[in-house]
Image (cartoon, rainbow, N blue to C red):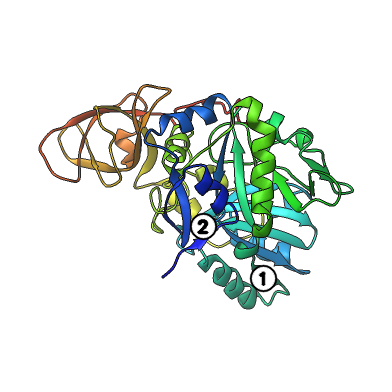
Amino acid sequence: MSLRQTGFHDRAASAGARFDEYAGYELPYRFGDDVLPEYFACRQRAAVIDLSPLRKIEVAGSDAGKLLQSVVTRDIDRLADGQIVYTALCDAEGNVLDDGTVFRFGPDRFRWVGYQDEDESWFRSHADRLGLQVALENSTRRLHNIAIQGPASRQIVTGLIEPAPGRSNPEDLPWFRFTEGSLGGRGGPDVLLSRTGYSGELGYEIWCHPDDGSAVWDTVFDAGASLGVGPLGLDALDILRVEAGLVFKGYEYDGTQSPAEAGIGFVVTPDKRDDFIGKAAIARRQLNPDHVFVGLLVDADDPLAGGDTVLGPDDAIVGAVTSGVLSPILERNIAFARIHPSSAAPGTKLTAKRADGGEARISVTAATIPFYDADKSRVRS
């Protein structure tokens, strides 16, 4: 099967991107031999990453809000026009099927942004089950996006877009809000700018038609040239998101974990009055969880990897690693793991064993997440 290319592919290639497959697309994983320049561009200045393979589903109609209220874990009725919320889809047993965001454009129009095409059929099946009047459209191929992340990102987007009537200026956007307008002024390409990201830094995303991808890329890099903006690939993004405590579908959950076990228990609105798929099961599992999601500080030269086991004091297996990276800013290896509650208290000394064999034990210590900027002051700045 041939891979699709995003609207930013040519510009990324010209910047030296090395491409790999992600979700059916050819996406940059690195822009050089060393990942550190990309990483520090994001932590210290600003970096741009192509996130176009995210699946976008338009949800519209008189019952659009009712449908989302019944299938996502957050309370959509509290979402204002122009606001975004991070949430999850769960099955009847309370297992996370996908995590993503919901954009609200008005009383009868929303957008879901997640990871899998199957979300559309999930929405459709439950709209039919409930007899709701909803129009669904997968808009992934006509809506591509780059993220501009880092402390200089607000300077880059300031003045970049002329807002549509009633929409906010880019520099005035609160966290998890969006605006719409024209790139570069009236007559420019139509774009949406959201104050969102996946890095643990102040950041934004620009959403556009793929035909306008080159213009968007050029405009962003022209605006950020004096600020040291650079491109960023998936390898650097993986480090950034683990430091920031952000989960990744297929790593932190595989369809058999509750939101809490997947590290996103906060996406469940605790006082949501309306029923939603998995609500009762999530509440039941929360009372007596099999595993909890924790961070690990790792005493080893090489990162741990998903599937490595975590052992308790008696050498019994108490859990498993889901992701591991070497953190440049912390100058040590860190990891995510799901482990038994009895071994999850911060400061608990444990050991890990690599899944690829060998008898060596690695000392690890349970830690709170996120590892970096625990109060999220940077992303909220």
Task: Check the image and report above or below for 43 versus 198.
Answer: above
Question: In the image, is 263 to the left or to the right of 300?
Answer: right
Q: Is residue 207 above or below residue 309?
A: below
Give the residue at mark 1: 136
Q: Residue at position x 58%, y 26% from top? A: 45
- Could you say which quadrant of the image residue 325 lies in? top left
- The answer to whether residue 272 of the structure is visible from this angle is no
**For marks 1 and 2 on the same chain, the one whose residue lies earlier in the sequence:** 2
Can residue 306 be seen at all in this image of the molecule?
yes
Q: Residue at x 50, y 44 (%)?
A: 265
Secondary structure beneath label 2:
loop
Q: Quadrant of the N terminus?
A: bottom left
Determine which residue is flagged by label 2: 115
Circle 1: element type: strand
* Left or right for 215, reference 91: right
Q: Position of residue 344 (x, y in %)?
A: 34, 34
Q: Is residue 298 above or below residue 125?
A: above
Q: What type is the residue that disc 2 sits on?
A: Tyr
Count the numbered circles shown.
Answer: 2
- Please indicate whether residue 77 sits to the left or right of residue 380 in the image: right
Q: Report the Cα–Cα distance between label 1 and label 2.
A: 16 Å
Kindly give the residue lying farthest to the right in the view shown.
Answer: 165
